Image: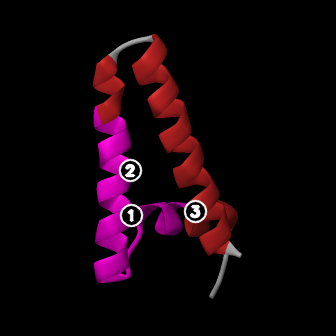
Amino acid sequence: MINRIIRAIAGTFILISVLLAVYVNQNWLWFTGFVGINLLQSSFTKWCLMEDILRKVFKIQD
């Protein structure tokens, strides 16, 4: 369940940052890259900051 939430958040962040880059300022693409790098890093290390945040905020257990 938590993995689906994380994917939804990451996808939303990417779409919003691309729209902001198109309509506001291209520097928003740095945020898109940041999200992508975090997704790639979590695939190698099996650690995700967003997962830790969600578990603490919603008190989700394994």
Say which amino acid is labelled 1. Answer: Leu
* Residue 61 vertical position relative to residue 4 in the rendered view, above or below: below
Tell me the kind of residue under disc 3: Ile
Q: Position of residue 2 (x, y in %)?
A: 65, 72
Q: Which residues are magenta?
A: 30-53
Residue 30 circle label: none
Q: Is residue 61 left or right of residue 44?
A: right
Q: Quadrant of the C terminus?
A: bottom right
Residue 14, horizontal then vertical, whole percent = 48, 42
Secondary structure mostly taken by the magenta-highlighted segment of the chain: helix
For label 2, the residue is: 35
What mark, if any, has residue 39 been given in the picture?
A: 1
Along the viewing direction, whichever of 33 and 3 lies nearer the viewer = 33
Type of amino acid at the residue the image marks with label 2: Val
Measured Cα–Cα span from mark 3 to mark 2: 11 Å
Q: Residue 54, relative to residue 14: is it above or below?
A: below
Residue that numbered label 3 is attached to: 6
Q: Is residue 26 magenta?
A: no
- In reply to whether residue 44 is colored magenta, the answer given is yes
Residue depicted at x 28% and y 35%: 30
Q: Residue at x 41, y 63 (%)?
A: 49
Whether tag 1 and tag 2 are in contact, CB under 8 A, the answer is yes
